[in-house]
Image (cartoon, grey):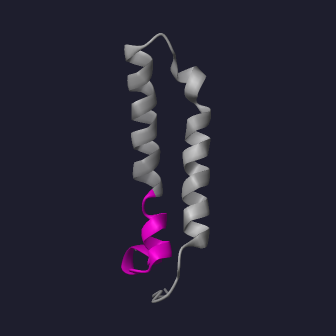
Amino acid sequence: MMAWRNCGCQRCRTHGVMGPAILITIGALFLVGHFSHYSFGDFWPVILIVIGAILVAEAVASSHGHVGP
């Protein structure tokens, strides 16, 4: 089991948000493409922005109380 799943520190909890955030973003982009004249190709950089925002949040989050492997 991955170490960040056993830990309750802010940094590890932020790391656990990456996958769901990417899936929600991709789904939202396809939904926008379906209901407007824009396509997924117009908004794909949003995925990179979401990844970058989560990585920045993870980098600045506190690791107080981190449980090592």
Residue under the image location 45 percent in, 19 percent down? 33
Coordinates of residue 44 in the picture (x, y in percent): 58, 30
- Farthest residue in the top direction? 37
Q: Is residue 5 visible?
A: yes
Residue under the image location 45 percent in, 88 percent down? 67
Coordinates of residue 42 in the picture (x, y in percent): 59, 21
Coordinates of residue 29 in the picture (x, y in percent): 46, 29
Q: Is residue 60 magenta?
A: no
Residue under the image location 42 percent in, 23 percent down? 32
Q: Is residue 43 above or below residue 52?
A: above
Q: Choose top left, top right, bottom left or bottom right for residue 2.
A: bottom left
Residue under the image location 37 percent in, 79 percent down? 6
Q: Is residue 37 above or below residue 68?
A: above
- Residue range highlighted in magenta: 3-17
Coordinates of residue 45 in the picture (x, y in percent): 62, 34
Q: Is residue 60 left or right of residue 24?
A: right
Q: Is residue 51 above or below residue 14?
A: above
Label the magenta part by its dominant secondary structure: helix
Q: Is residue 16 magenta?
A: yes
Q: In the rendered image, which quarter contains the N terminus?
A: bottom left
Q: Is residue 49 left or right of residue 9?
A: right
Q: Is residue 2 visible?
A: no
The tally of labels here is: 0
Q: Is residue 7 above or below residue 20?
A: below
